[in-house]
Amino acid sequence: MPTLLTLTVNGRQHPVQADPSTPLLTILRDELGLKGAKPACGLEQCGACKVLVDGVALPSCKKSAAEFAGKQIVTLEGLTSDGSLHPAQTAFLELQAAQCGYCTAGFVVAAAALLEQNPHPTRADIQAGLGRHICRCGSYHRIIAAVERAAELSSTEPIAYPTLRTERAGDGTHPSDRGHATQYPLDTIDAWLSFRDKAITIFSGKVEIGQGIHTALAQIVAEELDVEIARIRIAPVDTDHSPDEGYTAGSNSVQGSGGNLRRAAASARQLLLAKAAAALDVPADRLLVHDGLVIDPVGEGQIDYWTLQGDQPFHQPLNPDARLKSPAAYTVVGAPAPRLDLPDKVLGHPRFVTDLALPGMAHARLVRPPEWGARLLTVDVETARSLPGLLAVVQDGDFLAVIAESEAQAAAAAEKLRAAARWSPPTPPPDEENLYTDLLVGPSGDLLVVDGATVDAPIPSLLSPTESAQSHRARYLRPFTMHGALGPSAAAALWDGARLTVWSHSQGPFQLRAALAQALKMDESAVRVIHGEGPGCYGHNGADDAGLDAALCALALPGRPVLLQWSREDEHRWEPYGPAMAVEMQASLDSRGRVVAWNHDVWSYTHSGRPRRMEGASNLLASWLKTDGLPRPPARPGRGVHGGSHRNADPIYAFANRRIVKHSVPDSPLRTSSLRGLGAYANVFAIESFMDELALAAGMDPVAFRLAHLDDERGKAVVQAAAELARWQPDGRSGGKGQGRGFGFARYKNEKCYAAVVADVQVEKESGIVRVEKLWIAADAGQIINPDGLRHQLEGGAVQATSWTLKEAVRYTPAGLVSVDWFSYPVLRLAEAPEVAVMLVNSGGTPALGAGEATVGPTAAAIANAIWAATGARLRQLPFTPDRLLAELGMD
């Protein structure tokens, strides 16, 4: 029963009517509107929900609010009371110490508590104090540096609250939306840009998922139009008026959307200069532009863009002949720029889908089957109807959900209904112990890969020239891996009787709209999808599925928006996983140590499960559960250039004789889809581990061996830069003394960013524990838009790959899934994070290249090669757990 609780939060007393068992986090967010602390695990395992309680940083997601009565509670929003920033907030902004930012509130609060207790912490102190926190984006290196910087700031005068320009979470009411309700043709300026209110609004189809893409796009437009970046606004992606640029995936955003916006800006600039020349009665070629002010340096006349345009659409096509600014003249592109989205995240302002507070909003929770394949037999819905705040029970086949007035009431009703539901026995998955046997010997569709593309041709036998001096063969294995987003998949939806609006952190809003319309048997024009940010996952997790879940709930409660959040177990159990893979390598060397034949066979389940419109099937989970829903489509192999499991299977090295075969296995025991890098992670891990093994067989230093097989001059430069950065010594591997150094290199998709990684590891031979001490990264991403943002993406990819490589594997048995939280699915935490150093090899004047996935494969191989150098053990099966290493060392 609700009772009156009095909580002291941020120096004020708040009387709250609530059930005393309601978690403090729910009270803070839903009753007091303090959205800084984030719902994440709900189990006190990750740190995202931490607040200060009598000066101590404590999780708020599980303990009841009643336990905090009489205590002083301080949230992220209340760290300072005089309008200034706390030193930790200042430092996190200064060092851009976040990617998606979902974990940031917990880190900043914990840092504030640490600095209060220890004003001058060492790196070891920081790792101990914040060590159990999780950042799935891999920003640990910067977070530690930010706490060190905050310690320096603590002894200075208070820093004034800066002027910060922020954007709203994607609720469709961002000021930049005004006056742009039309979806213009993609070949027009108005599809991409709007000039209003002395600002310029960008309409991109690419979404912000923590990669800083919106900041990079703002830099591109500001550069081409000669305006300050402070004038740029980014409209949330909205299917009603944003351009459809497909999924935000594959490291394509800077090249794709950046190129489109650059052309649009150049076209707009040319038109505006022509208007200015007419208005000032001067030749256009003598006009200068400063922050949108067009100046005649001779006659001293001037007029600004907005006076010229009058806040009106251009109604003009893109001009293919519009002159683009020379990279040599860039002042904004190529310079660091603060991330546009970070102030909200560091200050605790609403930013994410889970932060939405729409008028009259209700809350929903799911009651999923206990395991895949279980069917709902009976459920006593009356057991939940008597609960306070319950608005509806939604049941359709095996889809079961509750809607209530508050999040706490929805969670309580879901638990009550879960206890009242009876399910059939699930379809058990095969034993995990047989995973790779099933993968390698099961039926598969076999395709030859030539120049990175699959071709329909006979599969040749293994290449093994008779003139070779020696041959080598090895097999490398990758398990199922989770996206494991820190926060829950979530969506909000509103059905007004004629149109469905869905707020989602999908990476493909237009594709989600099509899939929702199909699953709900609606016309696409009756569905609108608005993007709001979510916790970083870098791939296809449960965000799209949550969109249909929320839509089904909204249809059951017309006229009221419904916010639906998955639980931590929902997230771990029901998201699509990165697929298991097996790679077999075989190569022959001549007497000089040159590769004369190269064979690469890769077996994998599908990497393609994103939602889209398809014939008679759906990739949305709830559609498979509904009575009249669409079934799951059959698995399909990716056929594009470097698509799916054959991504980066074709190496960049100059091997004259190569045979690359893709074996697509259709029947995965677990649901799979796209995860950062797709097949590149396993393929590069295998290729670069194998290159080290071949170098050893040839008696060559591994860096020299790579350079000897590279014809690509930019690739050579990156390899040499990484070796110089890490002060690589030929044959400098320690040879089994517990410390080792390894190398890895690739060019993502053989067309994106070049990246080389050097890893230093420390191995405790007695325990089998591997610690990655430091990563050195050299990369060439072409024209650099934002060097700080580029470094951060390279760092984050490498640290995330370190977690995959050392710890992550989805565990399951015939009894069901084992990996249901952060304890049963361990990940890298701050205490285990390596130091990271990055060198950017600037290829100015060349096209900008996507870099978000470039370091994942080279990092895995560099760690594997470093472990061999440290121990003499060659690990070929991921992850490199202590048990696996001890077994390889013969110490099990």
Image: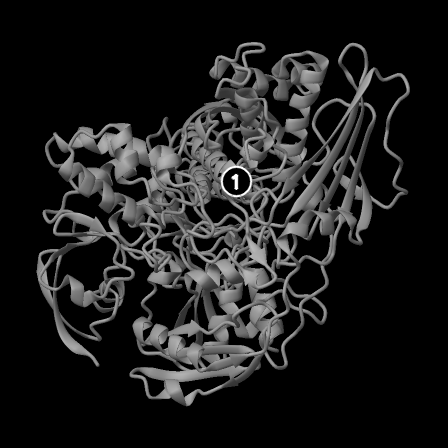
Q: Amino acid at mark 1?
A: Arg
Q: In the image, residue 789 lies at what x, y percent?
A: 43, 35
* Observer-nearest of 630 and 790: 630
Q: Is residue 140 above or below residue 350?
A: above
Q: Quadrant of the C terminus?
A: top right
For residue 193, side relative to residue 113 (left or right) = right
Name the image quarter holding residue 526.
Answer: bottom right
For residue 126, side relative to residue 701 (left or right) = left
- Name which residue lies at 78% across and 10% down: 592
* Observer-nearest of 564 and 640: 564
- Name which residue lies at 79% across and 40% down: 661
- Name which residue lies at 59% across and 50% down: 480
Q: In the image, residue 151 lies at what x, y percent?
A: 19, 31
| Residue denoted by label 1 | 262
Q: In the image, residue 514 lies at what x, y percent?
A: 60, 67
Q: Residues within 10 Å of mark 1 (few under 14, many from 20)?
A: many
